[in-house]
Image: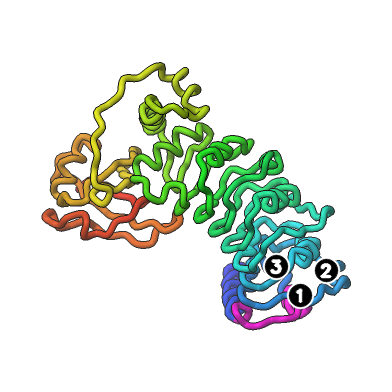
Amino acid sequence: MRNMMIQVMMMRLMILLYRCLYQNQHRMLAKVFLILENIPNLCFLNLTMNPLNDTWDHSMHEKQFPNMRDIVLNGTCVSWETISQLLLSLPNLTELHVSLNKYKTVNLPAECVHSSLTKLFVNNSQIEKWAEISKLGVAFPCLQTLNVIDSNISNFSLDGDFKNFPALTDLNISQCQMESWEEVDKFCQFPALINLRITDIPLVKDWEPKQRRQHFVARLPNIKQLNGSNVTETERDEAERAFIRYFMDSDQKPARFAELEKIHGKLDPLANVKFEKADYISLMVKFEEKEQIMDVYQRQTVGSLKKLLTNFTGLPADGMRLFHIEMCDGIIKCTAEMRSMSRQLLNFFMHEGDIIEIIRKL
């Protein structure tokens, strides 16, 4: 009973602290340290929109906060120098958020190495060169998750410095300025990368959803999850075959073409059937243990879709319930049951990457 009361009190204290610090204009780092000293068990701290661009007091190095695991410094204008100094007092920090700080470069001192950090978020920056991002791999050698959404990065540096990220498995580089498939091919050079998010880029802005995904899947054999959806063996096989057929009559074939032709052999061309881009959308369809990316015709009704899904589920059309799950950056935004059998799918305002979940009627 006593332990439960302590936990409730700590939870209330953390909520109060969050309210006190968020956008509360704490300009002096010393004040923040004073709060931390009085709550030594605090593990999460959000200082979003509090200006922390004051001069670092080197006497703070004597203070240690080993319980702090996650700190948010978004929109604080905190410098990389201050971050490096702050990390000395947070030896066990695993997650760091430094988005919206208008960084153009990464100026971490050469001696800054923080091995406990595994997740880093540097979104909405003004960084243009991957060489700057690669410095983060040196400073955080155990980094597993890196988010650099909405940057001005258009290409990797000549060598890419991919070896600087030996443990990186998850990378979100959506809304970058990448304009070349040759640059996309370089994602294969990350030693451990298996989960990639790369949406809203100029390179594929006008591509149809299915073709866009197929090209990414075919070019990146190391990626097991793309833009939040698992890449199944069946999908990879179909994507690689479609890739071969796409380039079979081209005079300029990418290097990946020869690699895939060795795997699948020479293929016969398929009939070229064109669809209106607005009529089809690529969705993840899930039923119990099964999931599959499908190009769904949006002008059909819910009733028609249920009939098409009978082969996928093994259920009669009247034996299933459909739910539209709207996704935003891999997070569920809202869920709605698709009840009306006569309603067109267009009226659900689906987006690429959304999910249709099928539930067996009881």
Residue 234 image-quadrant placement: top left
- Residue 35 lies in the magenta stretch: yes
Highlighted range, magenta: 20-38
Q: Amino acid at mark 1?
A: Phe
Counting from the top left corner in percent of width and height, residue 280 is at: 26, 47
Counting from the top left corner in percent of width and height, residue 212 is at: 39, 42
Camera-near label (1 vs 3) is 1
Using a 10 Å C-alpha cutoff, classify the residue at mark 3 as few (fewer than 14 neighbours), some (14 to 19) or many (20 or more): few
Q: Amino acid at mark 3?
A: Asn
Colour scheme shown:
rainbow
Q: Which residue corresponds to the image point at 50% horizontal and 53% vertical from the top-left? A: 174
Res 291 label: none
Q: Nearer the viewer, residue 160 or 222?
A: 160
Residue topped by disc 2: 63
* Quadrant for the N terminus in the image: bottom right
Specify which label sits upstream in the sequence, 2 or 1. 1
- Residue 112 lies in the magenta stretch: no
Above/below status of 188 relative to 71: above
Res 33 label: 1
Above/below status of 49 relative to 138: below
Residue 210 image-quadrant placement: top left
Residue topped by disc 3: 41
Specify which label sits upstream in the sequence, 2 or 3. 3
